[in-house]
Image (cartoon, grey):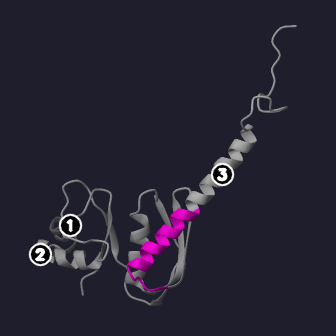
């Protein structure tokens, strides 16, 4: 008769444990709970920073966060995106927010090894001493002018 192939997770469970379908269901459930927990933590973080967004909603699916609501102004909107995007596990932010008070959009810059705020200010403004502008534009996410890290995304506002 020889070798006969069967689907190992089908049929009677005589060894205990879960079928692959049950394991997949449990894994999907865990993933949904983790994504809901991540969305809740991101929402708490935005609220703790006192960024003014009406009807703030954040959803996480895989490594993408979708954010909606009405930000007070463009600066607030950009800071919310940065808070979410600079969080571990988030690779993409789908920004669906609207803005109550419009203003010019800032540029974004990803920090590389060896960067400092003064070096970034020199690049964007032509003057290294304009680094406080970048620091202020990224508060309260930045706590010190010396605490930036490679991979972090910063707002670079236009100078008035």
Query: Which quadrant, please, contains the N terminus?
Result: top right
**In the rendered image, is residue 41 in sight?**
yes
Mark with earlier residue (3, 2): 3
* Residue 20: image location, x then y, percent: 72, 38
Does the magenta run of residues contain 90? no
Considering depth in this image, is 106 or 95 the residue closer to the camera? 95
Taking the spot 34% from the left edge, 77% from the top edge, the residue there is 106
Taking the spot 28% from the left edge, 60% from the top edge, the residue there is 111
- Discs 1, 2 touching: Cβ within 8 Å: no
Does the magenta run of residues contain 39? yes
Say left or right for 158 vs 132: right
The secondary structure making up most of the magenta span is: helix
Q: CA distance from mark 1 to mark 2?
A: 10 Å
The label on residue 120 is 1
* Callout 2: SS: helix
Q: How many marks?
A: 3
Considering depth in this image, is 116 or 158 the residue closer to the camera? 116
Q: What span is in magenta?
A: 36-53
Say left or right for 137 vs 81: left
Mark with earlier residue (1, 2): 1
Q: Which residue is mark 2?
A: 129
The label on residue 19 is none
- Discs 3, 2 touching: Cβ within 8 Å: no
Label 1 CA crowd tier, 10 Å (few <14, some 14–19, many 20+)? many
Q: Which quarter of the picture shows residue 58?
A: bottom right
* Callout 3: SS: helix
Q: Which residue is mark 3?
A: 28
């Amino acid at each position: 008769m020889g070798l006969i192939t069967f689907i190992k997770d089908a049929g009677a469970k005589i060894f205990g444990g879960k079928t692959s379908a049950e394991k997949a269901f449990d894994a999907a459930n865990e993933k949904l709970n983790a994504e809901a927990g991540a969305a809740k933590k991101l929402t708490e973080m935005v609220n703790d920073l006192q960024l003014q967004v009406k009807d703030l909603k954040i959803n996480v699916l895989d490594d993408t966060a979708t954010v909606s609501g009405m930000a007070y102004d463009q600066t607030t909107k950009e800071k919310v995106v940065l808070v979410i995007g600079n969080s571990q596990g988030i690779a993409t932010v789908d920004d669906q927010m609207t803005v109550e008070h419009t203003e010019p959009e800032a540029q974004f810059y990803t920090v590389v090894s060896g960067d400092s705020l003064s070096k970034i200010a020199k690049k964007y403004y032509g003057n290294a001493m304009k680094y406080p502008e970048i620091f202020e534009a990224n508060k309260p996410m930045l706590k010190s002018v010396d605490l930036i890290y490679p991979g972090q995304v910063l707002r670079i506002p236009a100078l008035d």
